[in-house]
Amino acid sequence: MFGHFKYLMYICNEIKMSINNNKITDMKTFKFIVASMIALCSFAMPANAQTTTCINPLTYTDIPDNDVIRVDDDYYMVSTTMFFCPGAPIMHSKDLVHWRIVNYVYDYLADDDIYNLRNGKNAYGKGQWATTIRYVDGTYYVLFIANDQHKTYVYRTNDIMNGKWERNEIAGAFFHDASLLFDNDGKVYVVYGNGELHITELLPDLTGIKEGGINQVLIATPRQGFGLRAEGAHFYHIGEYYYVIDIDWPSGKPRTERCWRSKNLLGPYEDKVILQGAFDGRGDGVAQGAIFDTQNGDWYAVMFQDHGAVGRVPTLQPMKWVDGWPILGDNTVPVKQFEVNLPESGENWTWDNDEFDYTANDELALVWQWNHKPINDKWSVTERKGWMRLHSNPATNIFDARNTLTQRTVGPRCYSEVKMDASKMKPGDKAGLCAFQANNCTIGVEVDNNGKKFIVATSGTRRESKDVLRIPLKGKKIWLKMKYVFTPQADDTCGPDKAFMSYSLDGKKWIDINDQLGMRFTLDLFVGYRSALYCYNTNGSEGGFADFDYFHQWTY
């Protein structure tokens, strides 16, 4: 870089001398010299002089319980996906604004009744929770609880973008909302809990709890004046202080990010509010997540906000050190827009269109997840080129149906659309498109016991649903569409968190269903709304299959 500046100074001096000696006599020569100077200036400028505009939320979709690390100039984020498979998505970014799913930690947690949706068992609202991610000496570690199994797992890999993860269980441990710390002396700790935050020392290889090691309450948070006491802990040793940041919910105030610090590992800890305030037109606060520095020495945080039916959306917040405290946002107030001191790089890829034009089943795009563990020989993108084929399996309703394929919805409002071929469906089969959460609606095709096909729309809950449309299907193919309004815009006539169904027999003329679903983020599923492709049989047989030509999703 210094060579460029030296050459730039040489050119400046030559221009000065040429002007003084009247050597520059035409505009063409002058423009060439000026263009050369501009090119050299831009070439000599350091990359970190460029910035990227952040407009929160980072992506208007369900990516909760964020933990983030930096490795050189790469950033990696992990999130919670609970019962969806594959699980624990790894996202990558270069600029902290654009995030892309690049891998998953596991394909499924267990091959049992829970993940096979057998005998009335499931992992709804449970599964993988609040993962912590760390990088040490060439190895990436993640730790989380499987809330349905009451177990704590550690996964590790040396190739976070493409590699497989090895797993071990920490026997006798159930670390709620845990955070790992590899301390400077080589010891490893995990801080976790709800209400009271505990600290436990682990073996250096994370295969178990260290016998005789530290295992005690670290911080006993106040009981009075809080609707929600401390949880969602993130643990750091930065400079001379140990920091624990967590969420709580003071009475009469929004969810809050609080920091505890001490110069001694075991305290005593003092506390301070570091982020608190309503955000983006909602009363919900922004809280729970990670703090980290950049290669340029700047500090940021990723914190999520409960955002109604779309789910828990991630935000990026600027951070400043003030008297040794990590203060987030604008002096603790969440920020909507600001400049990140990193050059713009990449695009978001947490949801996408799909034409299903794969050459092998293992190429299925990472934006897709199955509801629980799939039956891999009962779905295919190769049996019919350019189509996703879902074979029907016995089920009583969509919540115990196997091979339901899901993708996140996105706000403030969006459409999801599919084209489906129902010609090979058999008696008892149901297939179509679902707005998937506990309160749900479906639009698709059903086949009665006489083999007659009907266009059917339903609306209801996990326990019961009702038909809002049932008419005979004329033909073999049908186009299905779901409209989601999470935050109404100027041209909307509905309130927030509403879903609408429509269908077409030619892909051009659409018929709206006279029904609207009031969407709710319910804790029994604990996830934001997803669009789901389903095919199952209510007669107790395997039935036929439905083919989906494409899945298109777009905001409007």
Image (spheres, rainbow, N blue to C red):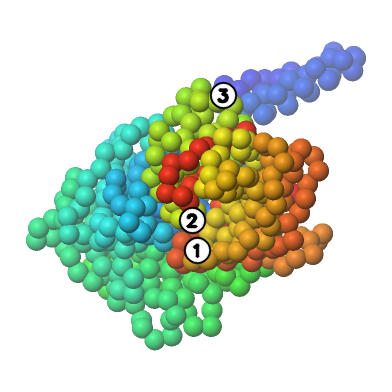
The residue at 32%/56% (across/down) is 119
**Between disc 1 and disc 2, whose residue precedes?**
2
Q: Few, some or many C-alpha atoms within 10 Å of disc 2 (few <14, some 14-19, many ≥20)? A: some
Q: Few, some or many C-alpha atoms within 10 Å of disc 3 (few <14, some 14-19, many ≥20)? A: some
Determine whether the residue tagged by mark 1 lies in a helix, strand or loop: loop
Q: Look at the image and tell me whether residue 544 can be seen.
A: yes
Whole-number angstrom distance, CA of label 1 to CA of label 3: 34 Å
Q: Please indicate whether residue 496 sits to the left or right of residue 68 in the image.
A: right
Say which mark, if any, is on residue 397: 2
The quarter of the picture where residue 309 lies is bottom right
**Between disc 1 and disc 3, whose residue precedes?**
3
Mark 1 vs mark 2, foreground winner is 2
How many callouts does the rendering have?
Answer: 3
The residue at 41%/59% (across/down) is 124
Callout 3, which amino acid? Answer: Lys
Where residue 115 appears, x then y in whole percent?
Answer: 35, 50
Answer above or below: position of 238 versus 406. below
Whole-number angstrom distance, CA of label 1 to CA of label 2: 8 Å
Which residue is the site of mark 3? 385
Where residue 328 appears, x then y in whole percent?
Answer: 52, 62
Q: Few, some or many C-alpha atoms within 10 Å of disc 1 (few <14, some 14-19, many ≥20)? A: some
The quarter of the picture where residue 23 lies is top right
Determine whether the residue tagged by mark 3 lies in a helix, strand or loop: loop
Callout 2, which amino acid? Answer: Asn
Which residue is the site of mark 1? 462
The residue at 43%/44% (across/down) is 541
Return the residue nearer the eye: 495 or 193: 495
Return the residue nearer the eye: 25 or 159: 159
